[in-house]
Image (cartoon, helix red, strand yellow):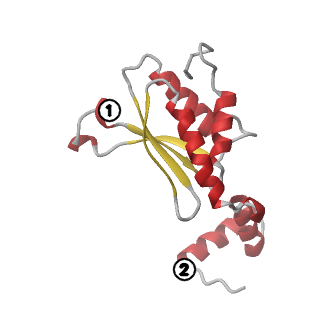
Amino acid sequence: MELNLPAELLQSLEREAQDAGRSLNEHLVQKLEAITPPVETMDKAALKRGLPQLVDFLKRLPGVQLLSSQVTADAFWWVKLRIDLRHPLAWSVVQELGHVLNDVSVSEKLPTVFKPVSPPPYLNGGPHEFLCWVIESEYNYIDPAWIAEELQNRMPPPGGRSGAVE
């Protein structure tokens, strides 16, 4: 296989490989293996079936309003939501989602990111009106139903530690 890379990208990859003590080929293979799922798990239909399960779970969280969700053409997905900052459990929900989705543990990191998003604050009102949150898959073909299951298993039950799930 022949691969033609832009000069700057090739230079960066060669530097990474050198710093890691690997050949360029070994380095590229290791990088690609880390982000490329096994072919038997590449099922875009499963993503489209799984996303509603994640959305349904998130809708049960106190103060959460779902705004939109999508599976992209390249088999990634995202969910955009608003959290009512006036809700007494709002920051517990943010903390729990951030913990599970971003950093549950060094050895069990989920392939997701939970982050705030906002239009430019100087053009709009404050966070009560315009702050939203996005959950995204970091790699393609990650089943959102699995992420929903992980959230359900790891977040506190109703009336639990913070009562974040209703």
Label 1 to label 2, Cα distance in Å? 41 Å
Going by the numbered disc 2, the residue's amino acid type is: Pro
- Which residue occupies the foreground of this view, 113 or 75? 75
- Examine the rendered structure and indicate whether residue 87 appears above or below residue 125: above
- Residue 141 visible in rendering: no
Residue visible at 23% across and 40% down in the picture:
124
Q: Quadrant of residue 160?
A: top right
- Residue 123 visible in rendering: yes
Percent position (x, y) of residue 104?
A: 67, 34
Percent position (x, y) of residue 72?
A: 52, 60
Going by the numbered disc 1, the residue's amino acid type is: Pro
Nearest-to-viewer mark from 1 and 2:
1
Query: Of the numbered discs in the image, which one, if any, rests on residue 127?
Result: 1
* Residue holding disc 2: 6
Q: Is residue 27 left or right of residue 122?
A: right
Query: Of the numbered discs in the image, which one, if any, rests on residue 23?
Result: none
